[in-house]
Each structure stands twice: as structure tokens, then as C-alpha cells.
Amino acid sequence: MSTVSTPTPASADSGPAPEVPVGDVDQAIEAQRLAAEATHLKQAMATQPVLDHARGMIMALTPCPAATAWEILIEVSQHTHTRLPKIATALTATTNENEPLPKNVEKALATALRHHRPTPNR
């Protein structure tokens, strides 16, 4: 079986890096990847309800389909350099807690709503 040296934190009295069987390294790398993926999925599941609530609010304000509401939220997030869950939380707080939208979010939302406004048929 092949072995590789695994890096360890440098210290004055540490010797050479210990050798670990390649299969163990592959398993460790896969375990780290899976742990990172699980963390990402947990975060996504935790923020999904507030994102859905905010999307519903946009749909009611505009009115527009869900895909357009999602585009509006993304546009606001990008123009304010603010993560999407924070935008959604600020928007839902306007109804749940009577909190005003931050001015930069309010301005970006107004711009995005105008940008996505349906054009009247002539």
C-alpha cells in the first residue's frame, strides 16, 4: 500500500510528517468534503423559510411570478452587497416587527421593482 506524508503544524521539535496510507487520506478528504456539504445544506435549510416569505411578499407587492420575485431579491442582494438571507430577513422584519428597511435596501428594492415591472400592452 502506498503512503503519503501528511502536513502537520510546524514546530521546532517536530520531526518529519507522519506517513499515512493513501486510502486513509482519501477517506479523510471525502469525510471533510461531506462535512462541508452537510454544513452548507443545514444553512440552506435554516434560511429557506425566510427566503420563501420574502419571495411571497415580493409576489404580493408586484404582483409577479415566483421566478421574478427571486430575481428581484437577487438583484437587491447584488446591488447592496448584502447576503440574500439578510435581505430576506430585513424585508420580513418590516411586517413581523414593524422595522423599516435599511435605506440602501429600500432604494435597491425600488429600483429592482421598477426594472421588473411588466410593460403595458399597447
Image: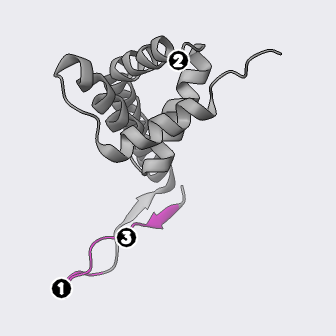
Please, is residue 66 above or below residue 27 in the view? above
Q: Quadrant of the N terminus?
A: bottom right
Q: CA distance from mark 2 to mark 3?
A: 55 Å
Q: Quadrant of the C terminus?
A: top right
The percent position of residue 83, horizontal first and vertical second, equals: 39, 43
**Residue behind mark 1:** 13
Residue under the image location 38 percent in, 32 percent down: 38
Along the viewing direction, whichever of 17 and 35 lies nearer the viewer = 35
Residue under the image location 40 percent in, 29 percent down: 41
- Tell me the amino acid under the disc marked 3: Pro
Q: Secondary structure at mark 1?
A: loop
**Residue behind mark 2:** 62
Along the viewing direction, whichever of 29 and 65 lies nearer the viewer = 65
- Tell me the amino acid under the disc marked 2: Thr
Q: Secondary structure at mark 3?
A: loop
User: Mark 1 or mark 2, which is nearer the start of the sequence?
Assistant: 1
**Residue behind mark 3:** 7
